[in-house]
Image (spheres, rainbow, N blue to C red):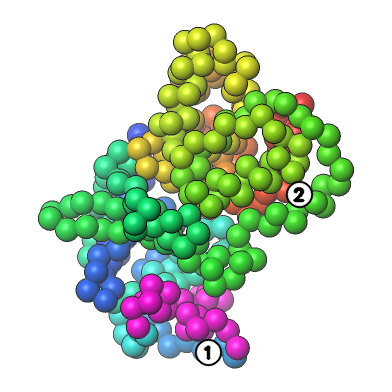
Amino acid sequence: MDTNILLENGTNELEVLEFRLAGNSYGINVAKIREIINYQQVTPVPNSHPSIEGIFMPRDTMITAIDLKNCLQRGQSEEGGLFIVTNFNKLDIAFHVEQVVGIHRVSWTEIIKPDATISNSEDGVSTGIIKMNGKLIIILDFEKIVADINPETGLKITEIDALGERTRNDVPILIAEDSPLLNKLIVDSLKRAGYHNLIHTENGQEAWDIICDCKAKGTLEEHVQCVITDIEMPLMDGHRLTRLIREDGELKDIPIIIFSSLVNDDMRRKGESLGADAQLSKPEIGNLVKIIDKLVL
């Protein structure tokens, strides 16, 4: 299936691949997908996590295969089906699924954020839900799934300690990140790095509302001198937020850092065309602090 679908920059749209597993419909952002291939035999890895089926090497690239059914506590996958080969956080990972249904173009405004009964900040693996044609498609948090299997793929907070002793800095920074866990980790990391004047929001729309409110009150410099944004967020994504800031003459000089698991070559070109000052993959929390230092000090 062709997943090389290009969207206009900053339109607040995404392509979602719908797939089936254990009788349910799930979704993944097409931007994370390298290709979809038929199931291949894998080589088991001794003493690996129960959700890791093994490794295989198509075209001389070693890829870890993950049993998504096992991750979701729906049993064990059998041979057959498909591998959705992904790339995010600089990792190549194949997820074993039963069936691919198709690709849907949707707006981030159509994605419903799960409430606390479905997904909490610590254990939930759903980032959003789409209602389509009388059914619900659950968008999975693949970064959290992988981080639960191997925590080393997540934010490395120890990188902050490696920066050495830091002095307090009151430059106001606005953060847009929909994952409650990552939002907290980013805030905690920046505070450890000396940045204490932080406003954190759950999506680009909330961040944009704050910017507009500060602009109207004439308090922009007091509250927003730097923006850190994820890409994937309900209501408004980070690319749309970046575009809105850069198109406003009063806001266009605010430094914008895109901090996302989706910073691959294609996404980097999009971010550059929209005017982002820097783009970093999410594990690079130490580099995020260094970039902030360069942009605001």
- From the top left corner, tell me how far across and down residue 228 is, in percent: 58, 36
Q: Name the residue: 25% across, 58% down.
A: 137
Query: Left of 262 or right of it: where is 74?
Result: left
Residue range corresponding to the magenta coloring: 47-75
140 part of magenta stretch:
no
Q: Is residue 54 above or below residue 106?
A: below
* Residue at disc 2, secondary structure: helix
Determine the image quadrant of residue 21: bottom left
Give the distance between the C-alpha atoms of the residues marked 1 and 2, in whole angstroms: 35 Å
Foreground pick, 151 / 103:
151
Foreground pick, 213 / 54:
213
Q: Name the residue: 29% across, 53% down.
A: 129
Which numbered marker is on residue 4?
Answer: none
Please state which amino acid type lies under the numbered disc 1: Pro
Q: Name the residue: 37% across, 53% down.
A: 116
- From the top left corner, tell me how far across and down residue 24 is, in percent: 24, 69
Which numbered marker is on residue 44?
Answer: 1
Residue ID for mark 2: 160
Q: Is residue 241 above or below residue 145?
A: above
- From the top left corner, tell me how far across and down residue 109 is, in percent: 30, 38
Q: Name the residue: 54% across, 81% down.
A: 49
- From the top left corner, tell me how far across and down residue 195 is, in percent: 71, 34
